[in-house]
Image (tube, rainbow, N blue to C red):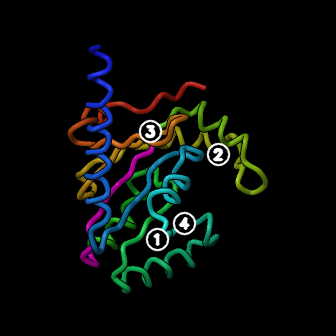
């Protein structure tokens, strides 16, 4: 009986978090910065939750110079957008955050929580150029610096990938402890 009552509450809480998420990223002039090691689900999340937004990604644009030009064009247009790179270090995120804030954008970080072993397994399922070398996944995992509001984010979300889909939580209220520890790096 108690489990039956708990299930609807969890579903309601999950719906509330999803509503908060969409309110945060659905505002005009919002820059969404994805954060996570390779194969953590960033691009899949973007395709599912941001199908209408322009995506700035080195995987798609192939050259940093082209990415910089698209970022400038997008900021000038005033459209909300998503940066779909690993962005695992504060220095990598700083470029996008500074440009967005200077252009008057709200900034939202989406941290994809995942374990390195799971990312390595998902990466092995990739085909062709989509699969990166194992050492690349491990290097990005080792370089990971968890995001913080002090970097210039207006909102931060914590997302986990499970077989059933994505679970979103507000960083500050649900995952304050995440700022003091790194994800499971066991392989």
- Number of numbered discs visible in the structure rendering: 4
List the residue tagged with mark 3: 160
Which residue is rendered at x = 27% and y = 68% of the image?
Answer: 27
Between the residue at mark 4 and the residue at mark 1, the CA separation in whole angstroms equals 15 Å
Sort mark 1 into few (<14), some (14-19) or many (20+) by Cα contacts within 10 Å: few
Q: Please check the rendered image and state whether residue 126 is part of the magenta-colored stretch, yes or no.
A: no
Q: Secondary structure at mark 3?
A: strand
Mark nearest the camera among 2 and 4 is 4
Q: Which residues are magenta?
A: 102-112
- Image mark for residue 57: 4
Give the percent coordinates (x, y) of residue 96: 39, 67
The disc placed on residue 85 is none
Give the Cα distance between marks 2 and 3: 21 Å
Distance, label 2 to label 4, CA atoms, is: 17 Å
Tell me how far mark 3 sits from mark 1, CA to CA. 22 Å
**Dominant SS in magenta:** strand
User: Where in the figure is residue 20, as x and y percent of width and height?
Assistant: 25, 52
Q: Earlier in the sequence, mark 3 or mark 1?
A: 1
Mark 3 against mark 1, which lies toward the viewer? 1
Quadrant of the image containing the C terminus: top right
Residue denoted by label 1: 52
**Residue corresponding to mark 2:** 136
- The answer to the question of whether label 2 and label 3 lie on touching residues, with beta carbons closer than 8 A, is no
Q: Residue at x 49, y 43 (%)?
A: 143
Structural crowding at the residue carrying mark 3, measured as other residues with C-alpha within 10 Å and reported as few (<14), some (14–19) or many (≥20):
some
Q: Mark 3–mark 1 contact, CB under 8 Å?
A: no
């Amino acid at each position: 009986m108690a489990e039956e009552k708990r299930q609807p509450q969890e579903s309601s809480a999950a719906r509330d978090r999803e509503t908060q998420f969409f309110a945060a990223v659905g505002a005009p002039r919002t820059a969404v910065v994805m954060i996570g090691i390779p194969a953590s689900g960033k691009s899949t999340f973007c395709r599912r939750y941001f199908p209408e937004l322009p995506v700035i990604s080195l995987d798609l644009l192939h050259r940093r110079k082209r990415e910089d030009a698209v970022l400038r064009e997008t900021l000038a247009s005033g459209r909300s957008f998503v940066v779909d790179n690993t962005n695992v270090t504060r220095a990598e995120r700083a470029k996008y955050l500074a440009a967005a804030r200077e252009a008057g954008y709200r900034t939202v970080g989406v941290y994809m929580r995942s374990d390195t072993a799971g990312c390595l397994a998902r990466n092995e399922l990739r085909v062709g150029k989509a699969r990166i070398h194992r050492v690349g996944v491990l290097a990005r995992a080792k370089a990971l610096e968890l995001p913080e509001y002090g970097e210039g984010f207006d909102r931060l979300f914590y997302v986990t990938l499970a077989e059933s889909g994505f679970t979103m939580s507000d960083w500050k209220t649900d995952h304050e402890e995440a700022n003091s520890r790194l994800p499971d790096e066991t392989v």
